[in-house]
Amino acid sequence: LADKMKIQPSAIVKKLFLQGKIVTVNQEVDYDAAEEIAMEFDCLCEKEEVIDVIEELLKEDEEDEKKMKKRPPVVCVMGHVDHGKTSLLDAIRDTDVTQGEAGGITQHIGASVVSVNGEKITFLDTPGHEAFTAMRMRGANSTDIAILVVAADDGVMPQTIEAINHAKAAGIEIVVAINKIDKPSANIERVKQELTEYELIPEDWGGSTIFVPVSAHTKEGIDDLMEMILLTAEVMELKANPIRRARGLVIEAELDKGKGPVATVLVQKGTLRIGDPIAAGSAYGKVRAMMDDRGRRVKEAGPSMPVEILGLNDVPNAGEVFVACGNEKEARSFAETFINQGRVKMLEETKSKMSLDDLFSQIQEGNLKELGIIVKADVQGSVEALKQSLIKISNEEVVVKIIHGGVGAINESDVSLAAASNAIIIGFNVRPDATAKETADREGVDMRLYRVIYNAIEDVEAAMKGMLEPVF
Ligand code: GDP
């Protein structure tokens, strides 16, 4: 039968096996079964291939070391509101001399590329950690290096701490930019001192974090900052294979009245070319035109390059994975399979599965070595007391790790961090705000509120022993 159908016998064995029928290559199949197999096979084998592709994509595919080439770092800018994230991004783009060249008007495409001494750096244009945490909730990592902006006249503030913890949870390298040094009230040493509390210790104090004093206004220190980013990238040995079908992430997308769906994608591997059939989440199509961050038409885009593309049939979500395919049919079935199975699967996989209720069973299955907790409380004293007590609950099997702690209501940033890091949230004398509650429900984040510290400790302790009383 396999011969007649011109397919591998193992493919039929595999298919029957998936239906629960165990056969060997030499076994006869009756006519009915053969017909059924032949009829189904056409479309099914295609679907299975697509599922295989998705599975392959979800795993980090192994690459041939010889084909790996150096790629530019992808950088984002984070920090407290008003500390100068937007100004710094603008200043960075301004110092790029090549910007002044013909056609050099910066377009907003969601990311931009800056050249420094002939080397490129890609910046994500959305300041803040929302950009990459939203992607991380979908299981995708977009950023290599985060510039943590701290205003020299203001020091470490709540969102500075938030940003640090988001970056740490994502495993992103942090470079600190102490901004606004032109201000008379600037105090660089104080910022350094304050950050040591968060394990960001300057090299001249025996640590390993790079600190660069800058001014987005006078542009002082910006060149240094760029050099330090390139140096950090060098150490990280960022590489990708440029000679393969492209894959990467959707940075942002919208429906343009004249052009139709427009998506900015970040190529992470391979090279994307005009004419390539592609699938981006549930959207698909053929790359009709590509534009770089200066609005110039380009024919191809390699690793770490952001480009705006036209030609998709629909608007994909930011954070969705895109893949270049062999032909349009493959792109289409990829998108359809993604809708039918991949999406559900991806969502399930990335959805926070952590809950105190099934903590014990996860521990027993050996799935869990670390329990991530985010602590929010009404006053700093309680945050510290909770942190200290919770860490002590760690036993041989599971380490309790506080991935973030802070004063104030549980906000969306806390929930997205929990969702992306598979952590739970403990609130003491605080409540979630409306959007946080909504996101927590949607992402399946376990959020527990207490009025007595002891009860919180007791619950986590009981959950680790499998003795937590269910809540009705
Ligand atoms: P963001 O909220 O972090 O994006 O901060 P912005 O870039 O919007 O900057 C907030 C304010 O700080 C604005 O009024 C800026 O003009 C000012 N600012 C930003 N960088 C500097 C700087 O280096 N020096 C001074 N003096 N002011 C700055």
Image (tube, helix red, strand yellow):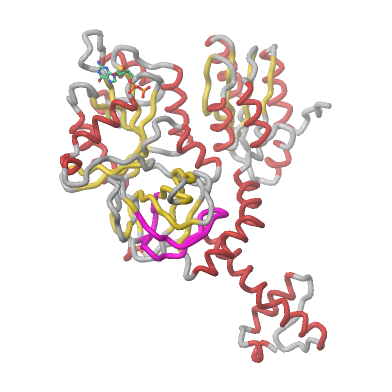
Q: Is residue 274 magenta?
A: yes
Residue under the point 31% across and 61% down: 299
Q: Residue 118 at what x, y percent from top left?
A: 17, 48
Quarter of the image containing the N terminus?
A: bottom right
In the image, taking residue 134 as reference, residue 43 lies left or right, namely right
Q: How many marks?
A: 0
Query: Looking at the image, which is closer to me, 365 or 63?
Result: 63
Q: Residue 245 at what x, y percent from top left?
A: 41, 64
Residue 420 seen from this side: yes
Query: Looking at the image, which is closer to me, 200 or 467?
Result: 200
Q: Residue 392 at what x, y percent from top left?
A: 59, 23
Q: Residue 317 at what x, y percent from top left?
A: 53, 45
Residue under the point 63% across and 30% down: 424
Judged from the image, the quadrant occupied by ligand 1 is: top left
Q: Taking 354 as reference, is 248 above or below it?
A: below
Residue 58 seen from this side: no
Q: Is residue 187 magenta?
A: no
- The magenta-colored residue range is 266-290
Quarter of the image containing the C terminus?
A: top right
Residue under the point 39% across and 57% down: 269
Q: Main secondary structure of the magenta part?
A: strand
Residue under the point 63% across and 42% down: 351
Taking the view exactly as shown, the residue that stands out farthest to the bottom is: 4
